[in-house]
Amino acid sequence: MRHPKTHVLKCWTQYYQAVKSGAKPFEIRLNDRDYQVGDTLILKEFKPFGEAIGGGYLGDGQIVRTITYMTDFEQQPGYVVLGIPDQSESTRLREALRAIAESKDQWYVGRVSMQDFAAQALSSSHGEGTGIREPVTWFSGRMESRLLENDHKGGWDKTRCSMDFLLEQMDKKCRRFVGRHGSGETTERLIDLLADIANYAMMQADRLRTIPGITEER
């Protein structure tokens, strides 16, 4: 049994938006990549060039999903259905809160209506039920997708790369970003560079927190 792989895929707008909303928890794909349960899909919104002027990747969004189920039942030869439900903790929490808020049965804890409490929680959180600001949630997802794309390199523990190496790589990415910003580079590529820079900073912070003798300032 092989290790899980990461597949970066184009996804036409109508299907991308349906996956994003949760209405379409699956993909039907030609199995030319040896898809397997446990693999990760990174879907990027795309408009075919033949459909309209300005075709290509749209915006800077992407969706990361894990394949949880596969079948070729009643599919064209070579095609498979990939089950890719949104299994994030925040999604499960939103679904539970929504079920409470929309329940026809009224119940209370003391004088507090559970339906009102759930509805308020759904509408007031920064991070769609997590309490984390939406830009932070979005950008951390971009960082994770870039890490997934580079998992084959083996990580950043001290046996593989030094702190000096991580600093050098982050500096190279920063210089590359400065050189490409404003030069006609796509927003998608620029955001990928920023995610790489943030990941190198994260790797260094992760290494620092494991160094014996470092204590918090008081």
Image: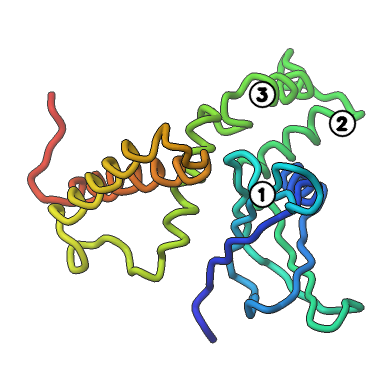
**Residue under numbered circle 3:** 121
Picture quadrant where residue 25 is located: bottom right
Q: Closest to the observer: 18 or 11?
A: 11
The residue carrying pointer 3 sits among few (fewer than 14), some (14 to 19) or many (20 or more) residues within 10 Å by Cα, namely some
* Quadrant where the image shows the C terminus: top left
Q: Is residue 32 left or right of residue 115?
A: left
Q: Is residue 31 above or below residue 1?
A: above
- Judged from the image, the secondary structure of the residue bearing numbered disc 3 is helix
Picture quadrant where residue 159 is located: bottom left
- Residue 103 disc label: 2
- Disc 3 versus disc 1: nearer the observer: 1
Residue 166: percent from the left, percent from the top? 21, 53
Residue 35: percent from the left, percent from the top? 65, 75
Q: Closest to the observer: 47 or 215?
A: 47
Q: Is residue 56 left or right of residue 24?
A: left
* Quadrant where the image shows the N terminus: bottom right
* Sequence-wise first label, 1 or 2: 1
